[in-house]
Amino acid sequence: MVLKQPDSAFSLGVYKVSNEEEFFKAASEIFKHSDLVIAQEFLPSEFDWRIGLLDQKPIFACKYYMAKGHWQIYNWNSRKSDRYGMAEAIPVNDIPPKILETAIRASSLIGNGLYGVDLKSIGNKVYLIEINDNPNIDSGIEDSILKENLYLRIMHSILDRIEISRDMSRFVSTDPA
């Protein structure tokens, strides 16, 4: 299984354990930093999907490949040149329907903000790994298809939210009487 620190990022605070001894060692390390531990089945795969969603609509998709010879996307114990696997941006229209449907359904349970939904596809099954409420968008990776239009979509969504909030505030009475 895999044990995770709930607020981990970039494969830090994530441990693969194969037996009781490894479990207790990893769990005790996580409990130094958190009151919670997330446990997941270990599902080996060549890559993980990340579907970027904003307002419950896909805005980017990437395949993150595992680091060479490692079970995670990042291998912090490796040389710098082998530290992380490749990332491949995929046009939103090319996201397999099951992947997209799962990502939208999962994130809609939380809200309509900006989310990065991580999934694995193994055979004909899709597994939700996690939902990131503050996903990284790196230049040349997640934005490589839409380029600046990705950022413009995000900024327009923020502006729309501000304008809706302003409109709603006109209906809220500030009169104490």
Image (cartoon, rainbow, N blue to C red):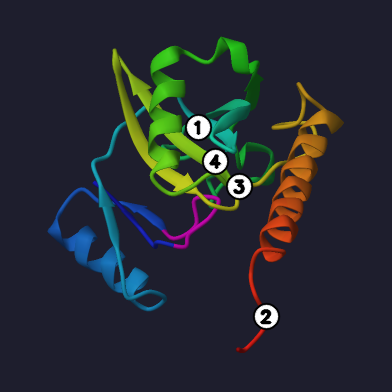
Q: Is residue 58 left or right of residue 20?
A: right
Circle 2 residue: 174
Kindly report which numbered mark, 2 or 4, lies closer to the viewer in this rendering. Answer: 2
Q: Is residue 144 left or right of residue 98?
A: right
Kindly report which numbered mark, 3 or 1, lies closer to the viewer in this rendering. Answer: 3
Q: Evaluate whether residue 118 shows in this view.
A: yes
Q: How many angstroms separate mark 4 from mark 1 (CA)?
A: 18 Å
Earlier sequence position, callout 4 versus callout 1: 1
Q: Give x and y (percent) for residue 24.
A: 21, 67
Circle 1 residue: 66
Circle 4 residue: 116
Give the quadrant of residue 112: top right
The segment highlighted magenta reads: 7-13
Are the two marked residues, 4 and 1, in contact with CB atoms closer than 8 angstroms?
A: no
Residue type at mark 3: give it.
Pro
Circle 3 residue: 135
Kindly report which numbered mark, 4 or 1, lies closer to the viewer in this rendering. Answer: 4
Q: Give x and y (percent) for residue 177.
A: 60, 89
Residue type at mark 1: give it.
Met
Are the two marked residues, 3 and 4, in contact with CB atoms closer than 8 angstroms?
A: yes
Earlier sequence position, callout 2 versus callout 4: 4
Give the quadrant of residue 34: bottom left
Q: Give x and y (percent) for residue 64.
A: 55, 30
Extreme bottom residue here?
A: 177
Residue at left offset 65%, top offset 15%: 91
Q: How many angstroms separate mark 2 from mark 1 (CA)?
A: 55 Å
Secondary structure mostly seen in magenta is: loop
Which one is in front, 38 or 58? Answer: 58
Residue type at mark 4: give it.
Gly
Residue at left offset 72%, top offset 64%: 170
Earlier sequence position, callout 3 versus callout 1: 1
Secondary structure of the residue carrying tag 1 is loop
